[in-house]
Amino acid sequence: MLLGTDLFLLLSLLACLLDSKFPKALPYVFQIAAVMGFGQLLVSKEFLVIFGEYMRFWYCFFYLLVALINIVALNVYLATVQKMWIIAKAWAGTVTFPSVMISVFFISNYGYVSSAEFPFLLLQVGLVLAAIMIGVSAALFLNPDLLPRFRRKKEVNQWK
C-alpha cells in the first residue's frame, strides 16, 4: 500500500512538472488517490482482526496494481494522444520500467517471506509482461528509428 501511495504521489509530481502535456486536474486526481491509499492503510490497521492479513495483502496488491496501470496509461497517452515519442520513451525507461520491476520484486519477496499463496499464473504473467516491456523499451531506446520505419512500412502496405 505504501508503494502504491508513493507511486501516486510520483505521478502527481510528474504531472505537475509536465503540466502542458497532461490535463490540469490530473495531478489533483493522483493526490486524492494517494490520500485515499494512506487513509485505507490507517483504517485497515483497525480492521485487521476482521479481515486478516491475507485479505489486507490482496486489497493492497490491487491498489498497487491500479497505480501501475495509471503509470502505463500515462505512457500510452504520451505516445498515442500527444504523439511525443521521445518523452514517451523517456517515461518508459525512467518511470514505467523501474516501477514495474520494483513492484514485482517487492510482491515476490513478500510472497516468499510470508508464504502467501499466489495463483500460479499471477506472478508468471507479471514477469512475462515486465520482460516484454523491457524488450520493447530497450529496442526503442537503442534504435529510435525503429518505430517510424515500422509505421512507414504499414503505410506503404495500405496503398498496395
Image (cartoon, rainbow, N blue to C red):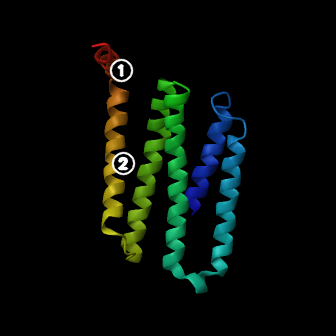
Q: Which mark is residue 130?
A: 2
Kindly report the distance in space between the C-alpha atoms of the residues bearing marks 2 and 1.
24 Å
How crowded pointer 1 is (Cα within 10 Å; few <14, some 14-19, many 20+) is rated as few
**Quadrant placement of the C terminus:** top left
Left or right: 31 as drawn, with respect to 95: right
Q: Nearer the viewer, residue 32 or 111?
A: 32
For the view shown, which residue lies furthest in the bottom direction? Answer: 49
Reply above or below: 10 against 155.
Answer: below
Name the residue type under label 1.
Arg
Q: How many marks?
A: 2
Q: What element does badge 2 sit on?
A: helix
Which residue position holds label 1? 151
Reply above or below: 37 against 100.
Answer: below
Q: Looking at the image, is mark 2 or mark 1 earlier in the sequence?
A: 2
The image quarter in which residue 37 lies: bottom right
Left or right: 142 as drawn, with respect to 93: left
* Residue drawn at point x = 28 percent, y = 17 percent: 157
Residue 74 point in image, percent of width and height: 54, 39
Q: Which mark is residue 32?
A: none
**Quadrant placement of the N terminus:** bottom right
Residue 88 point in image, percent of width and height: 49, 31
Q: What element does badge 1 sit on?
A: helix
* Residue drawn at point x = 60 percent, y = 54 percent: 6
* Residue drawn at point x = 51 percent, y = 28 percent: 87
Q: Nearer the viewer, residue 95 or 20?
A: 20
- Foreground disc of the pair 2, 1: 1
Name the residue type under label 2.
Ala
Reply above or below: 24 against 43.
Answer: above
Residue 68 point in image, percent of width and height: 50, 51
The image quarter in which residue 141 lies: top left
* Residue drawn at point x = 71 percent, y = 53 percent: 32
